[in-house]
Amino acid sequence: MSSKQVSSNTLLKEKLLLNPFDVNDDQMLEKIYMTHYHCVEKYDVVSLHSIASKVIDHSIEIAHSIKQNEEQNEQVREEKDTLISCPRLPALKRISCQMICTGRGEQYAHQTTMLILEQLREYSWDAKAVIALAAFALEYGKFWQLVPIPRDKLGKSLAELNGLHSIMENMQQLDHFNNLVKKVMEVVKCITHWKKLITEDYNVKDVPGLTDTLHEIPVLAYWTIITLVTCTSHVDFLGDKGYRYDLSKFDYKLDYILKNFKEHQDKCNTQIERIKDYSKRKDIINNSTETDIVKYLEALIVDPQDPRPVVYNVLAQKEAGIGVFKNKYVLLFISGTDNIDYETQLLISIDVKLREEPKEVEGYRKEDFSILWIPIVSVWDEEQRKKVENISEVGWFVMKEFKFKTGIDLIKEVFNYKGNPIILLISPQGKVENPDAKQIISTWGIEGFPFRTSDHIRLTQQWNWFWTEIKNLSSTIRELINRDCYIFIYGGTNSKWIEDFSSAVEKLKNSGTFSLVETTIESYKLGSESPKNVPRFWITIDNMLASRKRIKKGDAEVEDSTTREIKNLLSLKQDPNGWAILTKGSHVKLLGFGDAMLRTVMDLEIWKEKLDHEVSFDVAFKDYYEKCEFKSVPKKCEHREFANYPTDILAHLPCPNKKCGHEMGVASVKYKCCHGLETGDIA
């Protein structure tokens, strides 16, 4: 052999004879990882671990019951043939033989451990540890199978040949030995549990704690195997009289690494429980068939660490439980605390309107609607708290200092919340009726009640008939609609009112109050391009009403919203002064009678202060108009006469003769409303 080969062998021997207690875990990790390849071998670790654990458990039970004549090994064979891919018995026995033939001393145990790791280089870390445990169980089980309890002559002779006649004298030392074995089994159990975690579709992004365990597992597997090597090398000496050997170093080392690993494992378990909790809550939120509004909100905002969440009733200045929303529709307002003046004013306006007449619309009661604000901020400091508290005198609820991370993550994922204010409508059944109720509220205000997605579609489409006819009359109006500005469309037979209203609108436009693009105001007089268009327009609208059919709803016939709006528009025509319609682009905001509309436009200085509170122009205008309309109810107000109309659009009256009971035929009809000042008549 050459001197170079001798030198190489000497270095290898020095490397293998390293004392593992003389290096730290980082240095050891580097050496261990050099023996590991990608996991190629498919291996049923669970089954082998079960068998090996049973062998060791039965062996320890025998040690405890040696005086009670109990055998505990009959169940070991139950798991045979369950392994998917187990090292062949010769390979397992070879590893067992290497372990039992290891000399005493940590250096020799390290040498054998490194050789075993080289042989198992294509197995996963949990498989390496379990195979080493099985190799130990092979020897340890055979040892206790020969313990001298009453048996046949062959068994007694084999026990005596293996030096087990003095086993009773070493019971104290055996207790220490078995305690170390139990500790190793606990470590192996932790390793297999770790493997289960990383194979359950959990990754380091979802479970950051796995990063720490990934670096610890190779070291944990190494110390598991070296401890099993050391224990196996002492099995043959357990029956020797006066056997003494200090294994406390391994005991302390396992305690240390097991403590650190368990801390990281507990951290992983906590993170995984959070993932499971998140998934469970998400299922509740997305599955409206098995939930209600209370369960929905509990899944969204209830922190398990604080299972009794409260919301704050701003108007009543008191706290309330989530149960306050039972059987309620909830307008869920989610936002930060900055730049939300527009949204808060919208909701303040809606909150006020929800308490006004009429109390019921389209079968929905306003009292069944509540507003809940969930403010989301990164840090709750005194400044943030004051911003929330400054929103007072409103009839809604607020989640103060909402910090529940799972809830915040759910809001971001399920509602696609990215920091901009959102308003959702959630039904009493826990179903999102409108994921963007802000749109309908900002466009239609209380007219959009009950704020469903279908209501926005209905309101948008119910005026299509109007715009179709208006656009046919003028190219000017088409351009104004496309600009999405506010438009006053007006007309009438009173020339003075027309002149006054035109001047008032021009003065309003040039007042300097409206500097923002979104409050651009324009006007259009019906027939301004051709006076012939006016009668043509009204004849078309009249014909529309005549062609409308009543909707069958149960046993009753009702009007649809389009029919009602056509009638409202035709009522405007009867105003002797004039009429005006306020729109925002193609969205009709208000149908107004002459005097009240003129007064509202002229009184800009009185009501414009509302615009300083982020109230939109149409909302402020409409609020003041309604006050003017109430004051200017005429002594002889609107009337409507019908001639040559299909009778199914008119109300049918029974014959006054009780003996008859039939409905009367319709010859001519005149409807006249006098607000209680005069009686209506039918001719």
Image (cartoon, helix red, strand yellow):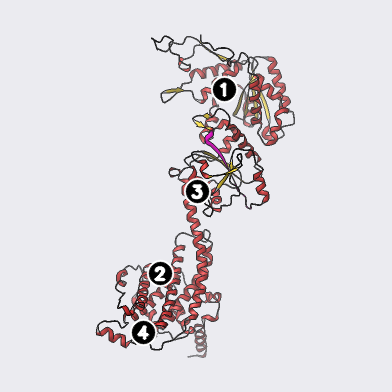
Q: Which residue position is annotated with label 2?
A: 41
The nearer-to-camera label among 4 and 2 is 4
Disc 4 to disc 2: CB gap under 8 Å: no
Residue 248's label in the rendered image is none
- Gap in angstroms between the C-alphas marked 4 and 2: 43 Å
Callout 4 secondary element:
helix
- Gap in angstroms between the C-alphas marked 1 and 2: 78 Å
**Kind of residue sitting beneath label 3:** Ala
**Magenta-colored span:** 367-379
**Residue 488 covered by magenta stretch:** no
Looking at the image, is mark 1 or mark 2 earlier in the sequence?
A: 2
Looking at the image, is mark 3 or mark 1 earlier in the sequence?
A: 3
**Kind of residue sitting beneath label 2:** Glu
Q: Which residue position is annotated with label 3?
A: 299
Q: Is residue 664 above or below residue 255?
A: above
- Gap in angstroms between the C-alphas marked 4 and 3: 61 Å
What is the x, y in percent for residue 41?
40, 69
Residue in view at x 49 percent, y 11 percent? 644
237 vs 522, left or right, is left
Residue 469's label in the rendered image is 1
What is the x, y in percent for residue 458?
52, 30
Near mark 3 (Cα within 10 A), the count class, few <14, some 14-19 or many ≥20, is: many
- Gap in angstroms between the C-alphas marked 3 and 2: 43 Å
Callout 1 secondary element:
helix
- Gap in angstroms between the C-alphas marked 4 and 1: 109 Å
Near mark 4 (Cα within 10 A), the count class, few <14, some 14-19 or many ≥20, is: some
Foreground pick, 194 / 311:
311
355 vs 620, left or right, is left
- Gap in angstroms between the C-alphas marked 3 and 1: 50 Å
